[in-house]
Image (tube, rainbow, N blue to C red):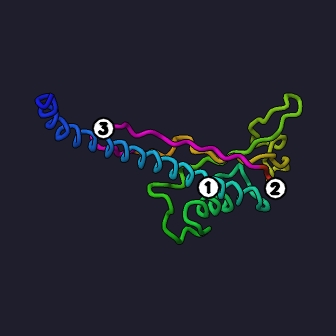
Amino acid sequence: MISAFRSRKGSAVIEGPAAALIIVVLMAGMVEVAKIGITYYSLKKTMFTIARYVATQQGVNFCDPADPTVTAAINLGMTGTTDNSAPVIIPNLTPDMFAITIERVDPSAFALTPCDCSITGCDISQGGGFPDYVVVTMPNGYTFSPKIPFTTVEPFPLKPIVKIPFGGS
């Protein structure tokens, strides 16, 4: 029986580092999953700031992509200032990543439909009506590249969507 115990002593020397390596890789993976969550949450908060700013302003022309209110809203979400005088909060984020669209409730279908830029739609500059919702999206997403030791993970896009009721005029 003593010889059986002696033959097992060396296995702990091999199993210990192997188990430690697995634990380190799992912990690194958990950290990367947390980074994905934090990045997604930060993007969602940025987009909510953009949508809230645009939805509460007066005289926003959603049919004009160069509308100063829309530009100020995107700057506010990205930098915390409407004049873009501060650094970008989330790295590699650019204004052209965001798309702001408007929707209106279609009473015949009881559904939300995109509001077109016409006099019968939501083009306020031509006498159209106000939208019911402001939607901020990232059509191409925000590319996230996880870094987990000893593995290769392809970058993937995070594509949050924010939709809030329009309260401006």
Query: What's the amino acid at mark 2?
Result: Gly
Residue extent of the magenta highlight:
146-164
Tag on residue 151? 3
Q: Residue at x 45, y 45 (%)?
A: 33
Q: CA distance from mark 3 to mark 2?
A: 48 Å
* Residue 133 percent location from the top left of the image: 77, 46
* Residue 165 percent location from the top left of the image: 78, 49
Q: Is residue 17 magenta?
A: no
Q: CA distance from mark 1 to mark 3?
A: 31 Å
Q: Which residue has dot 1 on it?
A: 45
Which one is in front in this view, the residue at disc 2 or the one at disc 1?
1
Relative horizontal placement of residue 19, taking residue 46 as reference (left or right): left
Q: Residue at x 57, y 51 (%)?
A: 41
Q: Secondary structure at mark 2?
A: loop
Q: Residue at x 88, y 29 (%)?
A: 108
Tag on residue 66? none
Q: Secondary structure at mark 3?
A: loop
- Image quadrant where residue 80 sits: bottom right
